[in-house]
Image: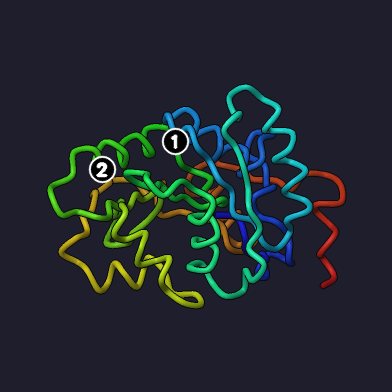
Amino acid sequence: MAAGAGSRFGFRPKGLLQRDGEALLARQLRLLAQAGVSRRVVVLGHHAGDITALLRKLRAQPAQAGLSWVVNPAPDDGPGSSLRCGLASLPEDLDGVLVLLGDQPLLEPQDLRAVLQAWAERAPGIELVLPLHAGQPGHPLVFGPQARQAVMAAQGGAGLREWRRAHPEQVQALPVDHPRCTTDIDTEADLSTLAAAHGVHLRWPAGPARDQHRNQ
């Protein structure tokens, strides 16, 4: 999921922020590949042009051969709208769909593997597995065909969150003792917090992607 406008970031594409010289979105796709997720779809919206240039370069790499992307024509409708765009581009017979955000800078391969393992070992009737840290749900999460159908039938910005609240008996929380799954970047202040709390420094790349939307 990488469709947001970055309105609290001067309308800049957060997925292009770099950690150790690697764009966050590229890092997320690398983690997915390392976790064995073979079909990967990026949902774009605002900043689709800037991000598509990065995705084209990534798809030329053997490890990203399964990469594709779609553009949500109405990204301001909310995350449910973007999620539906991504789901519409995936095969209908999937056992489960894993979702993560394009601006989570702390995720590691073991975080994805833990959620996927919990999904593989889930109890009968469970349709959603999501990590939970300090009472806060995070990403990546995995959901099944019933939840997928409900999301596809929803309208506007409604999506998985609404389904989860309506069907708590079909949700399995995965308690985690770290904030990697619940940490994302929304403001410039978050960059300072990230550096102070975790020693992780994110920097904007030089060039048009940094300044194109600064004055909007």
Question: Secondary structure beneath disc 1?
Answer: loop
Q: Residue 51's spot in the image, x, y percent?
A: 72, 49
Closer to the eye: label 1 or 2: 2
- Please name the residue shown 27% across and 51% down the image: 129
Colour treatment of the image: rainbow
Question: Secondary structure beneath disc 2?
Answer: helix
* Residue indicated by mark 1: 108
Relative depth, front residue between 24 and 127: 127
Q: In this view, does 33 lie to the left or right of 4?
A: left
- Please name the residue shown 51% across and 52% down the image: 101
Disc with the residue nearer the chain's start (1 vs 2):
1
Q: Amino acid under label 1?
A: Glu
Q: Residue 215's spot in the image, x, y percent?
A: 85, 70
* Residue indicated by mark 2: 119
Q: Amino acid under label 2?
A: Trp
- Please name the residue shown 64% across and 45% down the image: 202
Work out how far the residue at label 1 is from the one at label 2, CA to CA, in angstroms.
18 Å
